[in-house]
Amino acid sequence: MKQVKKLCCIVSLLLTTLPLAAQGSHWGSVNPHDYQYDMTLYATITIDGVAQTDLNGADIAAFVGDELRGVGRVESKDGKSWIYMRVYSNSPSGETVTFRAYNGVNEQHVATTVAFQSMGQQGMPSTPFTLDVLNPYTLTIIIDGNVETSKTLYMGDAISLGTHKRRGYTFEWTTPTPATMPAADLTIEGRFTINQYTVTFIVDDVILQQVKQDFNTAITPPADPSKEGYDFTGWTPEVDARVPDHDVTYTATWVESFAREDVNHDGTIDTQDVLGVYDFMQNAEGDLNRFDVNADGTVDTQDVLKIYETMQNL
């Protein structure tokens, strides 16, 4: 009898000194003698919000940071099942215990945390507390047919789509954009569409030409307009080579036209124009083209003669 008792004591001692691990656990084991304190957990699980009635194969572990602190095992009694776990620490309280799950293929995120408390207990076999297990899902964002982002999220995680801007284009999402991740892989697509802008040419407050064009396409001005008594000097502002990222209007500009012999631009050709040429010949002040009546590149007596000839023919 004494030998039986002694054997039982040895077996009990071995059981308390062996590292604790669920049979075949993905997580490995914890040696209780590495720690001073422990607490007890009785848990059940949900996966993506769905309660699990069959816990067989559940592989749950407790961590503080990345350090393994406990491994769960499934226990059953009277038709009920729960996950039993001892969690260890060298601090009597204050540490945050997180959990991880393994489904035989992938590690799963567990949203639930517990504050460690020496000799504490979470749940009971009859009323276990819930560990919310979340499967990983892939969020893929595709812009104009190209994958911009591919990342792992869990059900309920906020989806950040970022800001999409491009000069001269309008962006739109072409698929639904939920605020949070569903319990499934998700692909969200968007595209840029080129904008059109109005290009207008105005002559004396009248629209000469108005077209809508795609951003950055070439602008073709109309033929130069004409107006009696005036010379066309161009468009203001200067016509862009390509359509900018806004509507744009170009307005014709003019200068009053004068005969070349009317160098002082007073509307008549007379001796005052002759004096103007002589003055330029002496001082070379002013616009040469204005006083170069015969357009030969110089201002000389030939320009004076041209004025006299025109005066005689009036």
Image (cartoon, grey):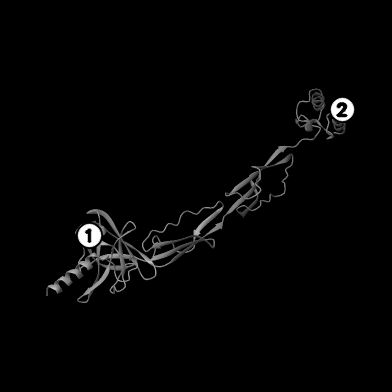
Instruction: Indicate the amino acid at tag 1.
Output: Asp
Q: Is 167 on the left-hand or right-hand side of 55?
A: right
Q: Position of residue 180 (x, y in %)?
A: 38, 61
The x and y percentages for residue 110 are 32, 63
The quarter of the rendered structure image containing the N terminus is: bottom left
Residue 46 picture quarter: bottom left
Judge by depth and name the residue closer to the eye, 189 or 276.
189
Q: Quadrant of the C terminus?
A: top right
The reply, left or right, for residue 99 in relation to residue 137 is left
- Mark 1 against mark 2, which lies toward the viewer? 1
Q: In the rendered image, which residue does mark 1 sit on? A: 38
Q: Is residue 307 left or right of residue 8?
A: right
The quarter of the picture where residue 90 lies is bottom left
The residue at which mark 2 appears reads as: 301
Residues 223 and 314: in front is 223
Q: Sequence-wise, which precedes: disc 1 or disc 2? A: 1
Residue drawn at (58%, 49%), measured in percent from left and top?
247
